[in-house]
Amino acid sequence: MPARKNLIAGIDRDRLKQVAEREGRRFAASRPKTSAALEAGAGTFLDAVPMHWMKDWPMPFPMVVDHAEGARITDIDGYGIDDFCLGDTGSMFGHSPKPVAKAIRRQARRGLTYMLPTDAAMEAGRLLTERFGDFKWQIATTATDANRFALRVARAVTGKPKVLVFNGCYHGTVDDAMVQLSNGKTVTRPGLTGQVMDLTEVSTCAEFNDLASVEAALKTGEVAAILTEPVMTNSCMVLPEPGFHEGLRKLATRYKALLIIDETHTISSGLGGYTAVHGLDPDIFVVGKCVAGGMPTAVWGLRPKLAKDYLDFNAGRLSGHSGMGTTLSANPMQFACLEATLAEVMTAEAYAHMEKGAERLSTGLKRVIEAHGAPWHVVRVGARVEFICAPGPLRNGAEAAMAHVPEVEAVLHTALLNRGCLIAPFHNMMLVSPATKKRQIDRLVTAFDEILTELFA
């Protein structure tokens, strides 16, 4: 038995290093075309990637994709990969769903952008309300933008300066959410690029599942809005404890703060997102990523009373730039894809398939973890599944940060890819799409078992 001090997440460090080196060599040796393409063409990009998140994949160099369809990606070396990352939720309903691809072709002949509404916009608005509830909608390009705009509305209507976010939260690259707790105090997150403003002037932090810490922040009278995901994601996933969301709603109402629910990841929860499935009651609703089938689109909606309050404010403000909106947002291509996704792709039948597959995946991963005696656990939120290389369940962002084991996760990600399975580079997130087959799920579980058999030998 290895000495306890030489273990990481229950694995012998020397064995982990051996497997890491072998899997890295295997990936690099098997993709000569990818390596050559990057060598020839990537030098024009800053740090050799078109967008720096592409450096976050743990393999020696990123795959270069040839095409994707359904729940499969094929790279330029000809490898077909079962895709459980699905564009980190952007393609949660599969790559290029047929109704969306058809809508793109049709709209492409009519124009790409003209900063005016279309018939599809009217229908998309109706479908948004039908799917997500009674809100007055606006269209953005990313959920980051939507969250930024929602916060401006909250501050305008309440006259208060701060947003309350949860330690370890994720809301895109919204500056206001880039804070954390340190020794019980809100501080700006370390590592932010070019950060000059003290974010604690506009933000305050509480722990997820801790209503007392939320109330303490709200009692100051400074908080315009609580911005939260229903489930903490983009970390080791943290589920809400019973009564937490009901408590948030009551506290927001009591202290005259707005409740913003960001469903950008938890849209995996079921038809209408976590809000519909679990009966939440936000003042502002935000969702992005997959809402238009992969076309860059986000939506944010205000309850009718809040919408009136905002329009009253807007009517009385001085003319000039509002700090909200972007030129290409609400373009006709977005509306064509929104309409197609909401009407034909984001259906009860699709979610039923996704739920069933995700349960199969979750059960399989749990079985493997238990068989090897790994001190790990599995969390599922609808179609979203995550294995966490630490005991659980986790209660808050502080515990989620401690449970994150990048050294182990990187080995697992590369080893799974070498066995034909792609999971998200950020933590251990997997999604089951309407196009995902049972055999793909079973291949992932088998590959996971093969890797753990060696790591825990």
Image (cartoon, helix red, strand yellow):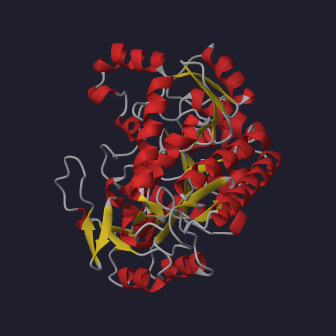
Q: Specify whether 140 is left or right of 290.
A: left
Question: In the image shown, does 121 or 188 lie closer to the viewer?
Answer: 188
Q: In this view, which residue lies farthest toward the front?
A: 1
Q: Is any part of residue 236 visible from this angle?
A: yes
Q: Quadrant of residue 110?
A: top right
Figure check: 272 above or below 377: above
Coordinates of residue 121 in the picture (x, y in percent):
64, 35
Coordinates of residue 348 in the picture (x, y in percent):
81, 50
Question: In the image shown, does 434 or 399 lie closer to the viewer?
Answer: 399
Figure check: 352 above or below 284: above
Q: Specify whether 432 is left or right of 75.
A: right
Figure check: 76 above or below 214: above
Q: Is any part of residue 437 visible from this angle?
A: no
Figure check: 67 above or below 450: above
Q: Specify whether 453 is left or right of 322.
A: right
Q: Specify whether 356 is left or right of 456.
A: right
Residue at 62%, 42% in the rendered image:
84
Position of the C terminus by quadrant: bottom right
Residue at 29%, 18% in the rendered image:
44
Coordinates of residue 347 in the picture (x, y in percent):
78, 45
Q: How many marks?
A: 0
Q: In this view, which residue lies farthest toward the left?
A: 196
Q: Quadrant of residue 198?
A: bottom left
Question: In the image shown, does 90 or 448 lie closer to the viewer?
Answer: 448
Coordinates of residue 403 in the picture (x, y in percent):
45, 66
